[in-house]
Amino acid sequence: MGDIHQDMKKKMEVFDKALTMIEKRVSPFVSSPLDEVMSQLTPVENAKLNMAYGYAINSLFYMYLKTQGVSPDEHPVKKDLERIKRYMAKTMAADKKTQDKDSLSNNEETAEKDAKPLSLKKEEKEVLKEDKMEEEEKDEERSSSVTKNIQKRKSPQSNSKKKRKNKKKRKR
């Protein structure tokens, strides 16, 4: 009788520790209203939270059935747990693909940065500045000429003004 009592006491201590750990992890979610918590999450995090809630509730019901002597393997709760597991797997796979794409783009950016020299000599910096300034000037010239062409096309008065100027020049 003493062995059963000691064995049960150890199991209850382990259960108590596990429950305390779960309470610590769940407390941030239950300390605030659910709507408030969910509004701060991304859609993927939102889906994960909903699945975790569903899985937790169904697991608790599964355990309750076991304590009542009902076989949960034949109960619909078993199918719900399996369904939620499938959704979790799909969500994790989609999340992993997203993370892989993000890490790939981050790796490309890092490679571009690594390809640039870390320290340039003063002369090299000046040459780069001059090249950049020349490119900016060319861009400005292009954009101003494009703007002038657009304005010419838009206003029919500009053509008549030119004709008048040309006539005045000819008269002189």
Image (cartoon, rainbow, N blue to C red):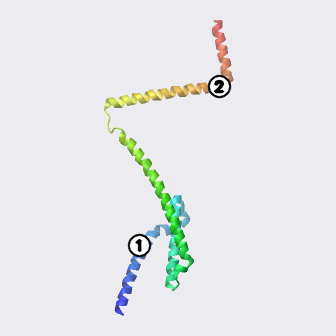
Residue 167, can we see it?
yes
Image x and y of residue 32, in percent? 51, 67
Q: Residue furthest bottom?
A: 1
Label number found at residue 170: none
The front one of 157 and 18 is 18
- Indicate the position of residue 126 as horizontal and vertical percent values: 36, 29
Residue at horizontal 32%, vertical 37%?
A: 119
What type is the residue that disc 1 sits on?
A: Met
Task: From the image, tell me which residue sits under label 2.
Answer: 153
Q: Amino acid at mark 2?
A: Arg
Describe the element under mark 1 as helix, strand or loop.
helix
Looking at the picture, how far across and down is residue 56, in whole percent? 50, 72
Numbered mark located on residue 21 in the image: 1
Give the CA separation, mark 2 to mark 1: 74 Å
How dense is the environment of label 2, judged by Cα within 10 Å: few (below 14), some, or many (20 and up)?
few
Relative height, residue 136 to residue 83 (above, below): above
Q: Is residue 40 visible?
A: no
Q: Earlier in the sequence, mark 2 or mark 1?
A: 1
Give x and y (percent) for residue 21: 41, 73
Instruction: Pick the quarter of the image with the N terminus.
Output: bottom left
Residue 159 lies, with reference to residue 9, above or below; the image says: above
User: Viewer-proximal residue, 81 or 22?
Assistant: 81
Residue beneath the point at 48% across and 54% down: 98
Q: Quadrant of the C terminus?
A: top right
* Badge 1 density bin: few <14, some 14–19, many ≥20, Cα 10 Å: few
Q: Count all numbered tags in the image, as a single digit.
A: 2
Residue at (52, 66) in percent of width and height: 86
**Residue toward you, 161 or 55:** 55
